[in-house]
Amino acid sequence: MGWMDDETGLDKTAANFVPLTPLSHLVRARTVFRDREALVDGPRRWTYAEYHADCSRLAGALAALGVTPGQVVATVLPNIAAQAIASFGVPACGAVLNTVNTRLEADTVTYILDHGAAKVVIVDQASLGLVEEAIAQLDGPPPVVIEVADPNAGHTPTGRHRTWEGLLEAGDPQFPWIMPKDEWESLALNYTSGTTGRPKGVVYHHRGAYLCTLATPLSWRMVMYPRHLTIVPLFHCNGWTHTWMMPAMGGCTVCCRDITAKAIFDAVADEKVTHFGGAPIILNALIDAKPADRREFDHPVEVFTAAAPPPPSTLRRIEELGFTVTHVYGLTETYGPATECTWNPDWTPLDTDGRAERKSRQGVPMPMNEAVLVLDETGTPVPWDGETPGEIAIRGNGVAKGYYKNPEATRASFRNGWFMSGDIAVQYPDGYVKITDRAKDIIISGGENVSSIEVENCLSGHPAVSLCAVVAKPDEKWGEVPCAFVELRDGQTADEAELIAYARDRLAGFKTPKHVFFEELPKTSTGKIQKFELRRRFA
Protein backbone atom coordinates (compact mmCIF):
# COMPACT_ATOMS: atom_id res chain seq x y z
CA MET A 1 0.00 0.00 0.00
CA GLY A 2 1.17 3.54 -0.57
CA TRP A 3 0.31 6.94 -1.88
CA MET A 4 -0.06 5.58 -5.46
CA ASP A 5 -3.16 3.68 -4.29
CA ASP A 6 -4.99 6.96 -3.80
CA GLU A 7 -5.11 8.82 -7.10
CA THR A 8 -8.07 11.02 -6.22
CA GLY A 9 -7.91 14.14 -8.34
CA LEU A 10 -5.12 12.81 -10.59
CA ASP A 11 -7.31 12.68 -13.64
CA LYS A 12 -6.40 12.55 -17.30
CA THR A 13 -7.52 15.87 -18.77
CA ALA A 14 -7.00 18.00 -21.87
CA ALA A 15 -4.34 19.85 -19.89
CA ASN A 16 -2.12 16.84 -19.24
CA PHE A 17 -2.94 14.32 -21.95
CA VAL A 18 -3.05 14.94 -25.71
CA PRO A 19 -3.22 12.04 -28.19
CA LEU A 20 0.11 11.71 -29.96
CA THR A 21 0.03 12.51 -33.67
CA PRO A 22 2.63 13.75 -36.18
CA LEU A 23 0.10 16.40 -37.23
CA SER A 24 1.10 18.28 -34.06
CA HIS A 25 4.55 18.92 -35.51
CA LEU A 26 3.25 21.06 -38.37
CA VAL A 27 0.71 22.82 -36.14
CA ARG A 28 3.61 23.87 -33.90
CA ALA A 29 5.94 24.69 -36.79
CA ARG A 30 3.39 27.08 -38.29
CA THR A 31 4.13 29.39 -35.34
CA VAL A 32 7.64 28.48 -34.20
CA PHE A 33 9.19 28.33 -37.68
CA ARG A 34 6.65 30.46 -39.51
CA ASP A 35 9.01 32.13 -42.01
CA ARG A 36 11.57 29.33 -42.33
CA GLU A 37 11.78 27.32 -45.53
CA ALA A 38 9.72 24.15 -45.11
CA LEU A 39 9.32 22.61 -48.57
CA VAL A 40 11.23 22.83 -51.86
CA ASP A 41 10.09 21.38 -55.17
CA GLY A 42 12.24 22.60 -58.04
CA PRO A 43 12.04 26.39 -58.19
CA ARG A 44 8.96 26.47 -55.90
CA ARG A 45 9.41 27.06 -52.18
CA TRP A 46 7.07 27.14 -49.18
CA THR A 47 7.56 28.70 -45.77
CA TYR A 48 6.04 26.88 -42.82
CA ALA A 49 3.13 29.30 -42.81
CA GLU A 50 2.51 28.58 -46.50
CA TYR A 51 3.00 24.82 -46.06
CA HIS A 52 0.44 24.68 -43.24
CA ALA A 53 -1.99 26.80 -45.26
CA ASP A 54 -1.82 24.48 -48.29
CA CYS A 55 -2.29 21.41 -46.07
CA SER A 56 -5.34 23.15 -44.54
CA ARG A 57 -6.69 23.97 -47.99
CA LEU A 58 -6.40 20.30 -48.97
CA ALA A 59 -8.11 19.14 -45.79
CA GLY A 60 -10.96 21.60 -46.26
CA ALA A 61 -11.40 20.75 -49.94
CA LEU A 62 -11.52 17.03 -49.20
CA ALA A 63 -14.13 17.60 -46.50
CA ALA A 64 -16.15 19.61 -49.03
CA LEU A 65 -15.99 16.65 -51.41
CA GLY A 66 -17.70 14.57 -48.74
CA VAL A 67 -14.65 12.81 -47.25
CA THR A 68 -15.44 12.01 -43.61
CA PRO A 69 -13.13 10.90 -40.78
CA GLY A 70 -11.98 7.32 -41.15
CA GLN A 71 -12.46 7.20 -44.91
CA VAL A 72 -9.52 6.59 -47.24
CA VAL A 73 -7.89 9.07 -49.62
CA ALA A 74 -5.37 7.52 -51.99
CA THR A 75 -2.44 9.14 -53.77
CA VAL A 76 -0.48 7.90 -56.78
CA LEU A 77 2.36 10.39 -56.77
CA PRO A 78 6.14 10.54 -57.03
CA ASN A 79 8.23 12.55 -54.56
CA ILE A 80 6.71 15.95 -55.33
CA ALA A 81 5.19 18.71 -53.21
CA ALA A 82 1.65 17.37 -53.62
CA GLN A 83 2.66 14.16 -51.86
CA ALA A 84 4.25 16.04 -48.96
CA ILE A 85 1.16 18.27 -48.62
CA ALA A 86 -1.11 15.21 -48.73
CA SER A 87 0.91 13.63 -45.91
CA PHE A 88 -0.54 16.25 -43.57
CA GLY A 89 -3.62 17.47 -45.44
CA VAL A 90 -5.33 14.09 -45.76
CA PRO A 91 -5.19 13.16 -42.05
CA ALA A 92 -5.96 16.80 -41.14
CA CYS A 93 -9.53 16.18 -42.32
CA GLY A 94 -9.64 12.94 -40.33
CA ALA A 95 -9.10 10.69 -43.34
CA VAL A 96 -6.65 7.80 -43.72
CA LEU A 97 -3.81 8.34 -46.21
CA ASN A 98 -3.19 5.53 -48.70
CA THR A 99 -0.03 6.18 -50.74
CA VAL A 100 0.05 3.83 -53.73
CA ASN A 101 3.19 2.62 -55.49
CA THR A 102 3.45 4.38 -58.85
CA ARG A 103 5.04 1.33 -60.50
CA LEU A 104 2.21 -1.13 -59.92
CA GLU A 105 0.14 -2.60 -62.73
CA ALA A 106 -3.52 -1.62 -63.18
CA ASP A 107 -4.95 -4.85 -61.76
CA THR A 108 -3.18 -4.38 -58.42
CA VAL A 109 -4.15 -0.70 -58.26
CA THR A 110 -7.76 -1.76 -58.83
CA TYR A 111 -7.48 -4.18 -55.92
CA ILE A 112 -5.99 -1.52 -53.63
CA LEU A 113 -8.61 1.12 -54.49
CA ASP A 114 -11.37 -1.44 -53.97
CA HIS A 115 -9.96 -3.03 -50.81
CA GLY A 116 -9.27 0.34 -49.17
CA ALA A 117 -12.53 1.84 -50.50
CA ALA A 118 -10.77 5.08 -51.48
CA LYS A 119 -13.18 8.03 -51.80
CA VAL A 120 -10.66 10.24 -53.60
CA VAL A 121 -7.45 9.48 -55.50
CA ILE A 122 -4.86 12.20 -56.15
CA VAL A 123 -2.82 11.28 -59.23
CA ASP A 124 0.30 12.58 -60.91
CA GLN A 125 -0.31 13.04 -64.62
CA ALA A 126 2.36 10.44 -65.47
CA SER A 127 0.21 7.83 -63.66
CA LEU A 128 -3.16 9.09 -64.88
CA GLY A 129 -3.59 6.43 -67.58
CA LEU A 130 -2.74 3.70 -65.05
CA VAL A 131 -5.32 4.96 -62.56
CA GLU A 132 -8.01 5.47 -65.21
CA GLU A 133 -7.48 1.87 -66.36
CA ALA A 134 -7.64 0.66 -62.75
CA ILE A 135 -10.84 2.60 -62.00
CA ALA A 136 -12.49 1.23 -65.15
CA GLN A 137 -12.16 -2.27 -63.64
CA LEU A 138 -13.84 -1.34 -60.34
CA ASP A 139 -17.23 -2.87 -59.61
CA GLY A 140 -18.26 -0.30 -57.02
CA PRO A 141 -18.53 3.51 -57.17
CA PRO A 142 -15.33 5.10 -58.51
CA PRO A 143 -13.28 7.51 -56.44
CA VAL A 144 -13.06 11.17 -57.36
CA VAL A 145 -9.89 11.73 -59.40
CA ILE A 146 -7.72 14.78 -58.71
CA GLU A 147 -5.08 15.34 -61.40
CA VAL A 148 -1.70 16.79 -60.45
CA ALA A 149 -0.01 18.46 -63.43
CA ASP A 150 3.59 18.89 -62.28
CA PRO A 151 5.17 21.91 -64.00
CA ASN A 152 8.64 20.57 -63.12
CA ALA A 153 7.88 17.61 -65.41
CA GLY A 154 6.40 19.80 -68.17
CA HIS A 155 2.83 18.71 -67.46
CA THR A 156 -0.26 20.73 -68.33
CA PRO A 157 -3.78 19.70 -67.25
CA THR A 158 -5.52 17.22 -69.54
CA GLY A 159 -8.96 18.62 -68.77
CA ARG A 160 -10.34 15.18 -67.94
CA HIS A 161 -10.42 15.66 -64.17
CA ARG A 162 -10.49 18.22 -61.44
CA THR A 163 -7.03 19.69 -60.94
CA TRP A 164 -4.82 19.80 -57.86
CA GLU A 165 -4.42 23.56 -58.12
CA GLY A 166 -8.16 24.02 -58.45
CA LEU A 167 -8.77 21.78 -55.45
CA LEU A 168 -6.41 23.82 -53.26
CA GLU A 169 -7.90 27.10 -54.44
CA ALA A 170 -11.32 25.86 -53.30
CA GLY A 171 -10.02 24.90 -49.86
CA ASP A 172 -9.99 27.04 -46.73
CA PRO A 173 -6.47 27.95 -45.48
CA GLN A 174 -8.05 28.34 -42.01
CA PHE A 175 -9.76 24.93 -42.04
CA PRO A 176 -9.72 23.62 -38.44
CA TRP A 177 -7.74 20.39 -38.39
CA ILE A 178 -9.50 17.27 -37.14
CA MET A 179 -7.01 15.86 -34.67
CA PRO A 180 -7.37 12.26 -33.43
CA LYS A 181 -9.38 11.71 -30.27
CA ASP A 182 -7.45 8.49 -29.73
CA GLU A 183 -3.81 8.08 -30.75
CA TRP A 184 -4.61 4.49 -31.80
CA GLU A 185 -6.77 5.86 -34.63
CA SER A 186 -5.61 4.91 -38.11
CA LEU A 187 -3.33 7.40 -39.84
CA ALA A 188 -2.17 5.63 -42.98
CA LEU A 189 -2.78 2.49 -45.04
CA ASN A 190 0.28 1.08 -46.83
CA TYR A 191 0.06 -1.96 -49.08
CA THR A 192 2.92 -4.44 -49.14
CA SER A 193 4.47 -5.48 -52.42
CA GLY A 194 2.36 -8.60 -52.79
CA THR A 195 5.07 -10.78 -54.34
CA THR A 196 3.35 -13.97 -53.16
CA GLY A 197 -0.28 -12.96 -53.68
CA ARG A 198 -2.50 -9.95 -53.18
CA PRO A 199 -0.81 -7.13 -51.26
CA LYS A 200 -1.66 -6.75 -47.57
CA GLY A 201 -2.79 -3.38 -46.23
CA VAL A 202 -0.62 -2.37 -43.29
CA VAL A 203 -2.37 0.10 -40.97
CA TYR A 204 -0.35 2.78 -39.14
CA HIS A 205 -1.58 4.51 -35.98
CA HIS A 206 -0.95 8.13 -35.01
CA ARG A 207 0.98 7.14 -31.88
CA GLY A 208 3.49 4.98 -33.74
CA ALA A 209 4.15 7.57 -36.44
CA TYR A 210 4.62 10.32 -33.84
CA LEU A 211 7.15 8.33 -31.83
CA CYS A 212 9.04 7.33 -34.97
CA THR A 213 9.39 11.00 -35.88
CA LEU A 214 10.99 11.75 -32.51
CA ALA A 215 13.17 8.63 -32.37
CA THR A 216 14.67 9.01 -35.84
CA PRO A 217 16.49 12.31 -35.14
CA LEU A 218 18.25 10.63 -32.20
CA SER A 219 19.39 7.73 -34.34
CA TRP A 220 20.34 9.99 -37.25
CA ARG A 221 22.35 12.46 -35.16
CA MET A 222 20.11 15.32 -36.32
CA VAL A 223 20.41 18.86 -35.03
CA MET A 224 17.95 21.66 -35.68
CA TYR A 225 17.15 22.76 -39.22
CA PRO A 226 18.19 19.69 -41.23
CA ARG A 227 17.53 19.57 -44.97
CA HIS A 228 16.11 16.22 -46.04
CA LEU A 229 16.09 14.93 -49.62
CA THR A 230 13.19 12.64 -50.56
CA ILE A 231 15.01 9.70 -52.13
CA VAL A 232 13.00 7.00 -50.35
CA PRO A 233 9.66 7.00 -52.23
CA LEU A 234 7.05 8.83 -50.20
CA PHE A 235 4.62 6.02 -51.08
CA HIS A 236 6.96 3.54 -49.33
CA CYS A 237 6.21 3.45 -45.57
CA ASN A 238 5.24 7.13 -45.95
CA GLY A 239 8.85 7.93 -46.73
CA TRP A 240 9.92 6.20 -43.49
CA THR A 241 7.87 8.93 -41.66
CA HIS A 242 10.54 11.53 -42.52
CA THR A 243 8.10 14.02 -44.08
CA TRP A 244 6.10 14.02 -40.83
CA MET A 245 9.37 14.39 -38.89
CA MET A 246 10.83 17.50 -40.52
CA PRO A 247 8.50 20.13 -38.96
CA ALA A 248 9.52 18.91 -35.49
CA MET A 249 13.10 19.91 -36.33
CA GLY A 250 12.29 23.10 -38.24
CA GLY A 251 13.83 21.36 -41.22
CA CYS A 252 13.19 21.50 -44.93
CA THR A 253 11.86 18.72 -47.17
CA VAL A 254 13.54 18.85 -50.59
CA CYS A 255 11.53 16.96 -53.21
CA CYS A 256 13.27 14.75 -55.77
CA ARG A 257 10.97 13.51 -58.52
CA ASP A 258 13.56 11.69 -60.64
CA ILE A 259 16.00 9.67 -58.56
CA THR A 260 19.41 9.85 -60.23
CA ALA A 261 22.97 10.26 -59.02
CA LYS A 262 23.10 13.68 -60.67
CA ALA A 263 19.94 14.82 -58.92
CA ILE A 264 21.32 13.73 -55.56
CA PHE A 265 24.71 15.38 -56.05
CA ASP A 266 23.00 18.57 -57.30
CA ALA A 267 20.67 18.67 -54.28
CA VAL A 268 23.54 18.15 -51.85
CA ALA A 269 25.59 20.89 -53.49
CA ASP A 270 22.86 23.43 -54.32
CA GLU A 271 20.21 22.84 -51.63
CA LYS A 272 22.74 21.92 -48.93
CA VAL A 273 20.94 18.64 -48.23
CA THR A 274 22.13 17.08 -44.98
CA HIS A 275 20.15 13.81 -44.84
CA PHE A 276 18.58 11.26 -47.15
CA GLY A 277 17.70 7.59 -47.11
CA GLY A 278 17.90 4.94 -49.79
CA ALA A 279 18.53 1.35 -50.71
CA PRO A 280 22.03 0.06 -51.55
CA ILE A 281 21.20 0.61 -55.23
CA ILE A 282 21.25 4.35 -54.49
CA LEU A 283 24.69 4.02 -52.91
CA ASN A 284 25.92 2.14 -55.97
CA ALA A 285 24.53 4.84 -58.27
CA LEU A 286 26.54 7.46 -56.40
CA ILE A 287 29.66 5.30 -56.42
CA ASP A 288 29.36 4.67 -60.17
CA ALA A 289 28.30 8.22 -61.12
CA LYS A 290 29.98 9.71 -64.17
CA PRO A 291 32.47 12.51 -63.42
CA ALA A 292 30.13 15.01 -65.13
CA ASP A 293 27.35 14.10 -62.70
CA ARG A 294 29.41 14.53 -59.53
CA ARG A 295 29.46 17.71 -57.44
CA GLU A 296 31.78 18.80 -54.66
CA PHE A 297 30.31 19.52 -51.21
CA ASP A 298 31.90 20.54 -47.93
CA HIS A 299 29.26 19.76 -45.32
CA PRO A 300 28.34 16.50 -43.53
CA VAL A 301 25.75 14.33 -45.26
CA GLU A 302 24.13 11.51 -43.28
CA VAL A 303 22.59 8.59 -45.17
CA PHE A 304 20.23 5.91 -43.87
CA THR A 305 20.49 2.79 -46.04
CA ALA A 306 18.14 -0.17 -45.84
CA ALA A 307 16.50 -2.90 -47.96
CA ALA A 308 18.98 -5.68 -48.80
CA PRO A 309 22.01 -5.56 -46.48
CA PRO A 310 24.69 -3.50 -48.26
CA PRO A 311 27.92 -5.38 -48.88
CA PRO A 312 30.87 -4.10 -46.84
CA SER A 313 32.56 -3.13 -50.12
CA THR A 314 29.67 -0.75 -50.94
CA LEU A 315 29.79 0.85 -47.50
CA ARG A 316 33.52 1.39 -47.83
CA ARG A 317 33.25 3.04 -51.25
CA ILE A 318 30.37 5.37 -50.40
CA GLU A 319 32.12 6.77 -47.36
CA GLU A 320 35.17 7.54 -49.48
CA LEU A 321 32.89 9.98 -51.35
CA GLY A 322 32.10 11.90 -48.15
CA PHE A 323 28.78 10.34 -47.13
CA THR A 324 28.34 8.96 -43.59
CA VAL A 325 26.20 5.84 -43.77
CA THR A 326 24.09 4.29 -41.03
CA HIS A 327 22.61 0.90 -41.78
CA VAL A 328 18.97 0.55 -40.69
CA TYR A 329 16.51 -2.29 -41.04
CA GLY A 330 12.76 -2.53 -41.04
CA LEU A 331 9.61 -3.42 -42.93
CA THR A 332 6.37 -1.79 -44.00
CA GLU A 333 4.93 -3.18 -40.76
CA THR A 334 7.46 -1.15 -38.72
CA TYR A 335 6.99 2.26 -40.36
CA GLY A 336 10.27 1.67 -42.18
CA PRO A 337 13.44 1.51 -40.04
CA ALA A 338 13.05 -0.40 -36.77
CA THR A 339 16.71 -1.06 -35.96
CA GLU A 340 19.92 0.89 -36.46
CA CYS A 341 23.55 -0.09 -36.51
CA THR A 342 24.48 2.31 -33.72
CA TRP A 343 28.17 3.05 -34.02
CA ASN A 344 30.32 1.82 -31.14
CA PRO A 345 33.42 4.04 -30.73
CA ASP A 346 35.39 0.91 -29.83
CA TRP A 347 35.09 -0.08 -33.51
CA THR A 348 36.83 3.06 -34.78
CA PRO A 349 40.38 1.60 -34.57
CA LEU A 350 39.37 -1.29 -36.85
CA ASP A 351 40.67 -1.25 -40.40
CA THR A 352 38.44 -0.14 -43.27
CA ASP A 353 37.04 -3.60 -43.95
CA GLY A 354 36.46 -4.24 -40.26
CA ARG A 355 34.49 -1.02 -39.83
CA ALA A 356 32.47 -1.76 -42.97
CA GLU A 357 31.63 -5.24 -41.66
CA ARG A 358 30.29 -3.77 -38.41
CA LYS A 359 28.26 -1.21 -40.35
CA SER A 360 26.64 -3.94 -42.43
CA ARG A 361 24.85 -5.30 -39.34
CA GLN A 362 21.19 -4.49 -38.88
CA GLY A 363 21.94 -3.45 -35.31
CA VAL A 364 19.84 -2.76 -32.24
CA PRO A 365 16.32 -1.37 -31.63
CA MET A 366 15.69 2.26 -32.50
CA PRO A 367 14.39 4.27 -29.53
CA MET A 368 10.68 3.85 -30.35
CA ASN A 369 10.95 0.05 -30.06
CA GLU A 370 11.18 -1.94 -26.85
CA ALA A 371 13.04 -4.99 -28.07
CA VAL A 372 14.37 -6.83 -31.11
CA LEU A 373 15.27 -10.45 -30.57
CA VAL A 374 16.13 -13.44 -32.72
CA LEU A 375 13.79 -16.32 -31.80
CA ASP A 376 13.91 -20.00 -32.66
CA GLU A 377 10.93 -22.02 -33.89
CA THR A 378 9.60 -22.42 -30.32
CA GLY A 379 9.69 -18.67 -29.67
CA THR A 380 12.78 -18.91 -27.47
CA PRO A 381 15.62 -16.40 -27.91
CA VAL A 382 18.63 -17.96 -29.65
CA PRO A 383 22.05 -17.75 -27.98
CA TRP A 384 23.80 -14.42 -28.55
CA ASP A 385 26.76 -16.08 -30.22
CA GLY A 386 26.67 -14.57 -33.71
CA GLU A 387 26.17 -18.05 -35.14
CA THR A 388 22.79 -19.53 -34.18
CA PRO A 389 20.07 -18.50 -36.67
CA GLY A 390 16.48 -17.63 -35.91
CA GLU A 391 13.73 -15.22 -36.94
CA ILE A 392 13.84 -11.51 -36.12
CA ALA A 393 11.00 -10.54 -33.75
CA ILE A 394 10.12 -6.91 -32.99
CA ARG A 395 8.08 -5.35 -30.19
CA GLY A 396 7.35 -1.69 -29.58
CA ASN A 397 5.42 1.44 -30.50
CA GLY A 398 7.02 1.41 -33.93
CA VAL A 399 4.97 -1.61 -35.00
CA ALA A 400 1.78 -1.19 -37.05
CA LYS A 401 -1.74 -2.15 -35.96
CA GLY A 402 -1.94 -5.10 -38.35
CA TYR A 403 -3.35 -5.90 -41.77
CA TYR A 404 -6.57 -4.24 -42.91
CA LYS A 405 -9.48 -6.65 -43.34
CA ASN A 406 -7.10 -9.61 -42.97
CA PRO A 407 -7.28 -11.07 -39.44
CA GLU A 408 -5.68 -14.34 -40.54
CA ALA A 409 -2.54 -12.63 -41.79
CA THR A 410 -2.47 -10.42 -38.68
CA ARG A 411 -2.62 -13.44 -36.39
CA ALA A 412 0.09 -15.20 -38.38
CA SER A 413 2.58 -12.31 -38.13
CA PHE A 414 1.59 -10.81 -34.75
CA ARG A 415 1.87 -13.60 -32.21
CA ASN A 416 2.99 -14.15 -28.63
CA GLY A 417 3.53 -10.44 -28.16
CA TRP A 418 5.88 -10.07 -31.12
CA PHE A 419 5.78 -9.06 -34.75
CA MET A 420 7.52 -11.88 -36.61
CA SER A 421 9.46 -10.46 -39.54
CA GLY A 422 10.21 -13.53 -41.64
CA ASP A 423 13.89 -12.52 -41.73
CA ILE A 424 16.54 -14.99 -40.60
CA ALA A 425 19.35 -13.56 -38.50
CA VAL A 426 21.94 -14.16 -35.79
CA GLN A 427 22.45 -12.09 -32.64
CA TYR A 428 25.90 -11.16 -31.37
CA PRO A 429 27.01 -11.01 -27.71
CA ASP A 430 26.54 -7.22 -27.77
CA GLY A 431 22.91 -7.65 -28.86
CA TYR A 432 23.46 -6.53 -32.46
CA VAL A 433 21.41 -8.42 -35.03
CA LYS A 434 22.67 -9.40 -38.46
CA ILE A 435 20.41 -10.82 -41.15
CA THR A 436 21.61 -13.98 -42.80
CA ASP A 437 18.63 -14.28 -45.14
CA ARG A 438 14.94 -14.10 -45.72
CA ALA A 439 13.43 -17.41 -44.70
CA LYS A 440 12.44 -18.10 -48.29
CA ASP A 441 15.92 -17.21 -49.60
CA ILE A 442 17.91 -19.79 -47.64
CA ILE A 443 19.51 -22.27 -50.07
CA ILE A 444 19.74 -25.86 -48.86
CA SER A 445 22.50 -27.60 -50.79
CA GLY A 446 23.29 -31.20 -49.91
CA GLY A 447 21.70 -30.68 -46.51
CA GLU A 448 23.83 -27.60 -45.79
CA ASN A 449 22.24 -24.16 -45.35
CA VAL A 450 23.72 -21.49 -47.64
CA SER A 451 23.05 -17.81 -46.92
CA SER A 452 22.37 -16.06 -50.20
CA ILE A 453 23.46 -12.79 -48.56
CA GLU A 454 26.87 -14.22 -47.65
CA VAL A 455 27.47 -15.24 -51.26
CA GLU A 456 26.22 -11.87 -52.53
CA ASN A 457 28.54 -9.99 -50.17
CA CYS A 458 31.46 -12.06 -51.41
CA LEU A 459 30.77 -11.47 -55.11
CA SER A 460 30.08 -7.76 -54.49
CA GLY A 461 33.67 -7.42 -53.36
CA HIS A 462 34.87 -8.10 -56.92
CA PRO A 463 35.84 -4.76 -58.50
CA ALA A 464 33.74 -5.41 -61.63
CA VAL A 465 30.49 -6.22 -59.79
CA SER A 466 27.91 -3.47 -59.24
CA LEU A 467 24.90 -5.51 -58.06
CA CYS A 468 24.43 -9.17 -57.30
CA ALA A 469 21.56 -11.49 -56.36
CA VAL A 470 21.90 -15.16 -55.45
CA VAL A 471 19.01 -17.62 -55.54
CA ALA A 472 18.55 -21.38 -55.38
CA LYS A 473 18.67 -23.38 -58.60
CA PRO A 474 17.20 -26.90 -58.46
CA ASP A 475 19.85 -29.60 -58.81
CA GLU A 476 19.37 -33.35 -59.16
CA LYS A 477 22.40 -34.22 -57.03
CA TRP A 478 22.43 -31.52 -54.34
CA GLY A 479 18.74 -30.57 -54.24
CA GLU A 480 19.64 -26.89 -54.67
CA VAL A 481 22.78 -25.00 -55.62
CA PRO A 482 23.56 -21.26 -55.46
CA CYS A 483 23.09 -19.38 -58.72
CA ALA A 484 24.22 -15.74 -59.12
CA PHE A 485 22.76 -12.95 -61.25
CA VAL A 486 25.15 -10.04 -61.69
CA GLU A 487 25.16 -6.47 -62.99
CA LEU A 488 28.63 -5.24 -63.92
CA ARG A 489 29.94 -1.73 -63.40
CA ASP A 490 30.13 0.49 -66.46
CA GLY A 491 33.36 -0.13 -68.33
CA GLN A 492 34.17 -3.30 -66.35
CA THR A 493 34.29 -6.88 -67.59
CA ALA A 494 34.20 -10.31 -65.95
CA ASP A 495 33.04 -13.76 -66.99
CA GLU A 496 31.41 -16.67 -65.21
CA ALA A 497 34.61 -18.61 -64.59
CA GLU A 498 36.35 -15.57 -63.12
CA LEU A 499 33.56 -14.85 -60.61
CA ILE A 500 33.16 -18.50 -59.61
CA ALA A 501 36.90 -18.71 -59.00
CA TYR A 502 36.77 -15.46 -57.01
CA ALA A 503 34.05 -16.90 -54.76
CA ARG A 504 35.77 -20.29 -54.43
CA ASP A 505 38.86 -18.57 -53.00
CA ARG A 506 36.74 -16.97 -50.27
CA LEU A 507 33.87 -19.36 -49.52
CA ALA A 508 33.34 -23.00 -48.68
CA GLY A 509 32.89 -25.13 -51.78
CA PHE A 510 29.18 -25.79 -51.21
CA LYS A 511 28.57 -22.03 -50.95
CA THR A 512 30.26 -21.23 -54.25
CA PRO A 513 27.79 -20.30 -57.03
CA LYS A 514 27.60 -22.97 -59.69
CA HIS A 515 26.22 -20.63 -62.37
CA VAL A 516 26.56 -16.89 -63.03
CA PHE A 517 24.27 -14.90 -65.33
CA PHE A 518 24.99 -11.32 -66.45
CA GLU A 519 21.94 -9.06 -66.85
CA GLU A 520 20.06 -6.11 -65.40
CA LEU A 521 18.40 -7.27 -62.19
CA PRO A 522 14.64 -6.82 -61.67
CA LYS A 523 13.99 -4.27 -58.90
CA THR A 524 11.13 -2.71 -57.00
CA SER A 525 10.59 1.05 -56.97
CA THR A 526 12.55 1.22 -53.71
CA GLY A 527 15.56 -0.55 -55.21
CA LYS A 528 15.00 -3.99 -53.71
CA ILE A 529 16.05 -6.79 -56.01
CA GLN A 530 13.07 -9.00 -56.84
CA LYS A 531 14.50 -12.43 -56.17
CA PHE A 532 11.15 -14.07 -56.78
CA GLU A 533 11.45 -13.02 -60.43
CA LEU A 534 14.85 -14.68 -60.64
CA ARG A 535 13.59 -17.86 -58.96
CA ARG A 536 10.86 -18.11 -61.59
CA ARG A 537 13.56 -18.82 -64.18
CA PHE A 538 14.01 -22.24 -62.59
CA ALA A 539 10.37 -23.00 -61.76
Image (cartoon, rainbow, N blue to C red):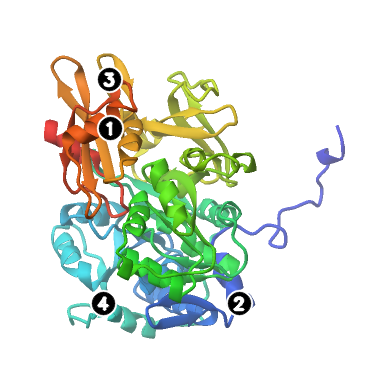
Circle 1: residue type: Tyr
* Circles 1 and 2 in contact, beta carbons < 8 Å: no
Q: Position of residue 204 (x, y in %)?
A: 45, 51
Q: Residues within 10 Å of mark 2 (few under 14, many from 20)?
A: many
Q: Nearer the viewer, residue 66 or 309?
A: 309
Where is 71 relative to 48, above or below?
above
Q: Residue 502, labelled with which disc?
A: 1
- Mark 1 → mark 3, Cα distance in angstroms: 14 Å
| Residue under pointer 4 | 153
N-terminal-most mark, 2 or 3: 2
Which label lies toward us, 1 or 2?
Answer: 1
Residue 337 place in picture, x, y as percent: 47, 48
Task: Identify residue type, mark 3.
Answer: Phe
> What type is the residue that disc 2 sits on?
Phe
Front tag of 1 and 3: 1
User: Is the residue marked by circle 1 packed among few (<14), some (14-19), or many (20+) residues within 10 Å?
Assistant: some
Residue that mark 3 sits on: 510
